[in-house]
Image (spheres, grey):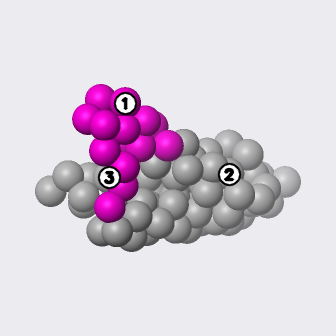
Amino acid sequence: MITALSFIGLFGGGFLSGGKRKEKGWLIGGVTGLLYSFLVFLFQYLGYDRLFNAEQVIYHTCYILIAMMGGILGVNIASTNSRRSI
C-alpha cells in the first residue's frame, strides 16, 4: 500500500513540477525523485543507522523514473494547454 501511494505521489509531484516549469520535464521530475529518495535515505541512515539494501535501491530507482515520467507528461500537458490559449 505504501509503495503504491509513493508511486502515485511521486508521479503527481513530477507532473506538477514539470507543468510549472514547462520545459525539461525529465530533469525536474528526476530532481523531484532524487530529493524524495535522498530524504528517505537521510531518515533511514540518521534515524536507524542503516543504508539502502539492494531491494530498496531498485525501489528508489523506480521512484526516480516514475517522477521523470510524470515531469515529462506535465510538460507536454502544460505545453498543449498554453498553445490552445494563443
At horizontal 61% and vertical 57% (from top left) the residue drawn is 30
* Label 2 residue SS: helix
Report the residue marked by disc 1: 46
Report the residue marked by disc 2: 28
Dot label at residue 6: 3
Q: Quadrant of the C terminus?
A: bottom right
Please name which of the two marks, 1 or 3, marks the residue nearer to the observer.
1
Residue 58 lies, in percent from the top left, at 39, 70
Distance CA(mark 2)–CA(mark 1): 26 Å
At horizontal 32% and vertical 61% (from top left) the residue drawn is 53
Query: Magenta residues?
Result: 38-53
For marks 1 and 3, the one nearer the N-term is 3
The amino acid type, in three-letter code, at marker 3 is Ser
Residue 79 lies, in percent from the top left, at 74, 59
* Label 3 residue SS: helix
Q: Is residue 23 above or below residue 20?
A: below
